[in-house]
Image (cartoon, helix red, strand yellow):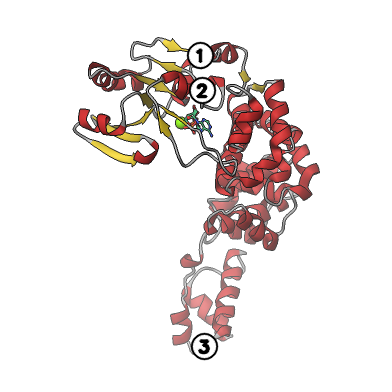
Amino acid sequence: LPNEFELARPVLQTIEQAGYEAYFVGGSVRDTILGKEIHDVDIATSAYPNEIKGLFKRTVDTGIEHGTVMILDHGTGYETTTFRSESTYTDYRRPDQVTFVRSLAEDLKRRDFTINALAMKEDGEVIDLFDGLTDMTNHQIRAVGDPQERFHEDALRMMRAVRFASQLDFSIVDETLAAITAHAQLLAKIAVERTQVELLKLLQGKAPQRGLQDFMATGLWQHCPDFADHGPALTALATELTQGVSSEIAAWTLLATKFGLNSAAVTPFLKHWKTANQTITAVQAASKAAQILATSDLNAWQLYQCGAALAPVANEVAVILGAPDRRAALQAQLAALPIQHKKELAITGKELMQAGIQPGPQLGAILGDLEYQVVTGVLPNETAALVAHVNA
Ligand code: ATP
Ligand code: MG
């Protein structure tokens, strides 16, 4: 057992000694069986939240209405969720009402895919009620139970399927894929923030072509904000993207660049996806640079505008789109820039006013011009030289 499980064993033992059942469940069991590193350990139990709270000194109510209590043990938090069944599905989203049950089988039945419906006892014994181990061996993603019903209940599961296809490099079995195709339009009912999480994980996965091909073939893409006009670009990406992008910003920059969006068009695109404003600013800068890098080097001013943090992202995206890798050249070019940021300019607005420039819009224009002249090497970044230039 991985160390994370060994450390959590006493927690399970405490619950069991009190007469309840407790198991490791979810992604950590799946990833352990796959030999991957695990991050957080989830526990499912027959004990009700209040019963759990009675057994441990330190707990936090992280989602008590859904049955989740975090147990704090030796500095680690364990999300512990009471077995539950989900009955009332409205709006094709996960139900807001859950029913606590005492049966592990009921709990596993409501989980999305067979590989995610495995439970592990404290001693390492695996409970596999839906042949998840066979699917794991065959690298397959298969809905638990009737796939039509499961995607009708919760449309986000369709995005999770294509996301796992990318992350695990697994294939979605035919019946499950057909059910996604049949229900793809229900994705429109899902909060875009939740779809976004899955899309970003897909693009960062180890086999993004696989996830993207399923995303395209099932029609899911047509129900994502502002994707409908970009079918050919997305289809091309589904063969070009042979490894996952390195970050969320890189994922958005790739899409914006591939779609040919200019800075103005990036804003509504990302607003429809409800990203943070700082993501919009970053993607505007990185996609502008990536577009140039697709065919040529950046000049000093273009590189300066992109900035040191985003230049590698722009290069990563340009490379995906077929440009040569200019990473080393960009690093050298960055190191050679006279300044990296406006605040390094050897003159301020205040100093310009002291030199006799009137405050107002022209002051900003003069500063902007000085910044450009310094970055492009026309003027040295020295206060006296800059003042002299302004007064000339
Ligand atoms: P990750 O490694 O990305 O965390 P995960 O499988 O642990 O993957 P989570 O979103 O953390 O995914 O969910 C934990 C478990 O809860 C899943 O393994 C699955 O059993 C169940 N689950 C999560 N979301 C759903 C859903 N929409 N429908 C059904 N079961 C779900
Ligand atoms: Mg998880």
- Which residue appears at 59% of the width and 48% of the height? 192
**Residue 34 at what x, y percent from top left?**
51, 17
Query: Circle 2 is placed at which residue position?
Result: 109
Crowdedness of circle 3 by 10 Å Cα count: few (<14), some, many (20+)? Answer: some
Identify whether 288 is placed above or below 190: below
Report the amino acid beneath label 2: Lys
Query: Circle 1 is placed at which residue position?
Result: 129
* Element under disc 3: loop
- Residue 185, located in which quarter of the rendered image? top right
Q: Nearer the viewer, residue 339 or 193?
A: 193
Rounded to the nearest angstrom, the CA distance separating label 2 from label 1 is 9 Å
Q: Nearer the viewer, residue 346 or 284?
A: 284
Report the amino acid beneath label 1: Leu
In front: mark 2 or mark 3? 2
Crowdedness of circle 2 by 10 Å Cα count: few (<14), some, many (20+)? Answer: some
Mark 1 CB within 8 Å of ligand 1? no
Query: Circle 3 is placed at which residue position?
Result: 357
Q: Nearer the viewer, residue 281 or 71?
A: 71
- Which residue appears at 50% of the width and 21% of the height? 117
- Which residue appears at 60% of the width and 24% of the height? 143
